[in-house]
Amino acid sequence: MKVLFVVNPCSGKGKIKNEILAILKVFCGCGYDVTTYVTSAREDAIKVSQEAHIKGYDSIICCGGDGTLNEVITGVMNARSPISIGYIPAGTTNDFAKTHKIPLKLTEAAKAITDSAENYNIDVGKFNDERYFSYIASFGIFTSASYKTNQNVKNTLGHMAYVFEGISNLVNIEEFDISYTADDKEYSGKYIYGGITNSTSVG
């Protein structure tokens, strides 16, 4: 199997840096032909994932946080590619991985990929033909915390970095008039938060 291994070295506390050789050993031990791509900027993973199928890769395995996974999914969806995606969670909170019972220990997640007999399907959403999401789409209070929290602060404080950023949102709570349809039923009202998610916890 020809695999593109996309790695975000800044995710979480950079723990991938100490375990990348052990992960590659798992893949090579199963006969995978692995090409490693280390991201260096936002949306790097989108660009390389869009081209993966054209370049003959059978699968993309990404190692990083929920944002890295979303970029890889976006790239695959943009290309309308049939390629499968594997995920090794190395982020700050790893909500998506916890929900879908993906091992949080990096080498165990790698082994779960190589041991898997079949693909596991997930829902993917899209905003107005512009942007895909696999983890969460949300609006209102606290939603900016995941985007505004500094990566260096996340690497130092871990999950608490999101908490401190979220606390700063409490001084500016805004209501939104929302109408939506779910399961053929219509709802409307004033909301301070709303989300569509593939996860049982967020941030």
Image: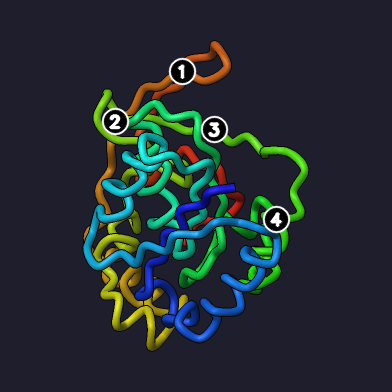
Tag 4 residue: 114
Q: Residues within 10 Å of mark 2 (few under 14, many from 20)?
A: few
- The scheme the figure's colours follow is rainbow
The Cα atoms of the two marked residues, 1 and 2, are separated by 14 Å
| Quarter holding residue 133 | top left
Q: What element does badge 1 sit on?
A: strand
Identity, as a three-letter code, of the amino acid under mark 2: Asp
Q: Is residue 5 visible?
A: yes
Identity, as a three-letter code, of the amino acid under mark 3: Asp
Tag 3 residue: 123
Does 84 appear above or below 93?
above
Label whose residue precedes the other's in the sequence (2 or 3)? 3
Q: Residues within 10 Å of mark 3 (few under 14, many from 20)?
A: few
Identity, as a three-letter code, of the amino acid under mark 1: Thr
Residue 108 place in picture, x, y as percent: 70, 69
Q: What element does badge 3 sit on?
A: loop
Residues at marks 1 and 2 touching, judged by CB atoms closer than 8 Å: no
Residue 4 place in picture, x, y as percent: 45, 53
Q: What element does badge 4 sit on?
A: helix
Q: Residue at x 36, y 35 (%)?
A: 54
Does 15 appear above or below 112?
below
The Cα atoms of the two marked residues, 2 and 3, are separated by 27 Å
Of residues 95 and 61, the one nearer the viewer is: 61
The Cα atoms of the two marked residues, 3 and 4, are separated by 22 Å
Of residues 104 and 55, the one nearer the viewer is: 55
Tag 2 residue: 177
Q: Residues within 10 Å of mark 1 (few under 14, many from 20)?
A: few
